[in-house]
Amino acid sequence: MKRTLITGAAGFLGSHLVKRFLSEGHYVIGMDNLITGSLKNIDEFRQNENFEFQNHDVSKFVDIKGDLDYILHFASPASPIDYLKIPIQTLKVSSYGAHNLLGLAKAKGARILVASTSEVYGDPEVHPQVEEYYGNVNPVGPRGVYDEAKRYMEAVTMAYNTFHNIETRIVRIFNTYGPKMRLNDGRVLPAFIGQALRGEDLTIFGDGSQTRSFCYVDDLVEGIYKLLLSNYDKPVNIGNDSEITISEFAEEIIQLTGTNQKVIYKDLPINDPKQRRPDNTKAKELLGWEPTVLRAEGLKITYEYFKSLSKEELNKKEHNNFDNYIVR
């Protein structure tokens, strides 16, 4: 039986990966320090004899007993509000954390896949974004702690690949959505649905002309799984290339929820990308992967998930309290 370590296992993407790898017959070790993750996301696996959970911060030394075949590094805050409130932790998890896990991969002879992001392209001047594009990132802007941490993670991963001959894979993840997203994490899709369910006006930052491309989580997980098992060690974009403006997206949400809120506009945050769409050529040619879930279909599933939340969860607008994780 293959043994796989998944960091960030109690998060949105990590919990979906746990489910997939258990279904593929792996023994899964889920690791998370719960700074943004939730045990609720992995409750369904707790009785599975092939799953174990370790509460640990990967920016500190990581020790796993026994053999390991695969490591998937998905631990990281992933919403702008997160990394504005916990900038140092955001930097550390993709730098110290990546370094620790690459060292573990070296010691165990394991293959490691690291979760990079479309944010390495910053506010792109090339559209759609191809993997060869170096990006347009402000290293000292408010988003820089996330963007540059991920760029460093790619660099140290390739260094371990070339110098230590570690088997590495790098996925650049574009906007992803689906069940188990945090409703109050500040990203546009859960923000819109939460506002609609609470009967609030939908808030757009900027004039709404900026674009995003939303990939349903099952499609993303399939792409990640195929990349892990491939022989390709350079970065690969995984995302849905169906692009939509934020204004159009707000209208889709209003139509989906059957509500009649108006849309209000606020100032665009600094360095917020004006456009985002992956070039999926490499994923198609190298992995035989492309997204299959239409946005209308994925949004319906996601909406039903958010509707199933308790009234308390739905009305919780306050962001996570990070006080216990911050050393001052």
Image (spheres, rainbow, N blue to C red):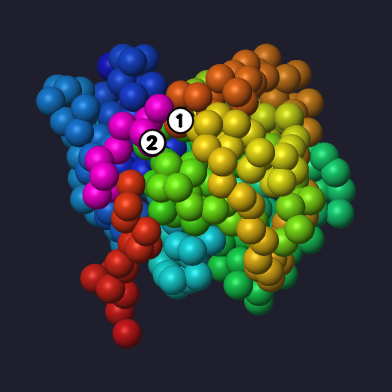
Pointer 1 with pointer 2, Cβ within 8 A: yes
Name the one closer to the observer, 27 or 276. Answer: 276
Quarter of the rendering containing residue 235: top right
Residue 227: image x %, image y %? 58, 26
Is residue 306 highlighted in magenta? yes
Screen quadrant of the C terminus: bottom left
Residue visible at 78% across and 26% down?
281
Q: Secondary structure at mark 2?
A: helix
Q: Is residue 117 above or below residue 28?
A: below
Q: CA distance from mark 1 to mark 2?
A: 6 Å
Would residue 283 appear left or right of 128 to someone viewing this image?
Answer: left
Indicate whether residue 184 is drawn in magenta.
no
Q: Report the span colored magenta.
A: 304-313
Can residue 229 be seen by looking at this rendering?
no
At a point 27% along the width and 54% down the height, the residue shown is 33
Q: Position of residue 199 (x, y in %)?
A: 45, 47
Instruction: Answer few, some or many: residues within 10 Å of disc 1's Cα (few below 14, many 20 plus, some between 14 and 19).
Output: many
Residue, far bottom: 328
Q: Type of residue at label 1?
A: Thr
Q: Nearer the viewer, residue 274 or 229?
A: 274
Q: Which residue is mark 2?
A: 306
Residue 136 visible in rendering: yes
